[in-house]
Image: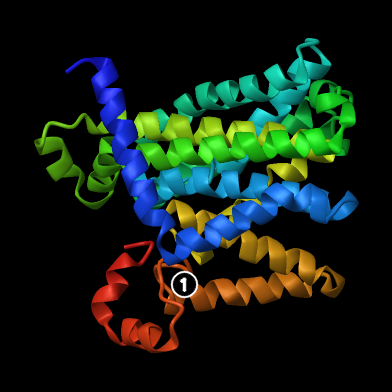
Amino acid sequence: MTVLDTLQNGINRTTGRLKQDVRSRNGVIFMIAGVLALLAPVLVGGYTLDLVMQLIILVLVVTSWIFIAGYFGMFSFAHAALYGIGAYAAVLLAGEAGLHPLVGVLLGGVVAGILSIPIALPVLRLSGAYVGMVTLAFAEIVFRLVIVFRDVTGGPTGYTSFPALFGGNRIALYYFVFVLVGALLLVQYGLLVNRFGLVARAIREAPDAARMLGNNVPRYKLAGFIIGSSIAGVAGGLQAHTVLIISPPMIEVNRMIEFMAMGIIGGFRTISGGVFGAVIVFGLSEGLRDLGEVRLVIWSIMLIVVTIYFPNGIAGSSLDPRERLRELLDRDNWSGWPID
């Protein structure tokens, strides 16, 4: 079988699975959300359009974290740092090296992917809490370096000396974000519904069995970590061009916890869970902004409730009250608990 035949078979499987999923409950919801997002510049403008754009980018960040943590079982705390690395690389390449901002965004993803390798290599040998500790240390190192090298990064006040994408045209930027995020979501989906995704789930559930079947487990885990990190880096570059500033709060640990909360609330082990989680948490945060810090308490309580009573997240649970009750009473469903 040639490479083209293999690629064609992969596309056929992805297309067939996509058609099945589109007919599902979540598929219908996503189609409606996609149409509304496509029409957003017509329906809303100004600050609201910027919020929609930030939400779309958040969806990409959370799904890329789920790609690593949910499918491969590598519970990484370094994702916000890699998201920030992509953002800083994108704006510094455009602002200091004089590259086109679009090239800067794409290279930001490449830089994040390359710099994820040093942290991925030790993670391949670890499991459980040790993965969290190593990746958390990496995130703290990146945060401190951004503060220390203030002549390059702008330090605590941030960096703004970079040209805007599309000359600051927000409509053009919106549709660019919409198309690029949609394409990267399809890339993740295509990988996860094919052999790559099957091996990833096998590694997560039974790494020894996956190895005995002839799969190169370290190579698959390294590839998964680099792909997820690169996508996070691209999302960071898009976010920097959306808000036109990049500063340390973008990569601090609280930001990482927010991404994780979105993934867990939406559904820790499905790409669609990232979409649900980002919409719910971001919607609550913005809708309850007048309540100040109280809104953080509210979505934190929601995280506790979802973790206990919806172990598969919103995307993985039935919305029918009777089916939901049967799920809760069936203890076998709790096998999907995120930290098992």
Q: Relative to the observer, which residue lies in front, 296 or 262?
A: 262
- The relative height of residue 166 versus residue 251 in the rendered view (above or below) is above
Residue 209 sits in which quadrant? top left
Q: Quadrant of the N terminus?
A: top left
Residue drawn at (80%, 48%) of the image: 41
Residue drawn at (55%, 34%) of the image: 231
Q: Is residue 127 left or right of residue 27?
A: left
- The relative height of residue 109 versus residue 98 in the rendered view (above or below) is below
- The relative height of residue 273 versus residue 305 in the rendered view (above or below) is above
Q: Whole-percent x and y of residue 63?
A: 51, 48
- Judging by the rendered image, the residue that carries numbered circle 1 is 307
Instruction: Inspect this view and state whether residue 100 appears.
Output: yes
Q: Whole-percent x and y of residue 99?
A: 76, 12
Q: Whole-percent x and y of residue 261?
A: 56, 61
Extreme left residue here?
Answer: 212
Q: Relative to the observer, which residue lies in front, 149 or 173?
A: 173
Residue drawn at (84%, 38%) of the image: 170
Q: Amino acid at mark 1?
A: Thr
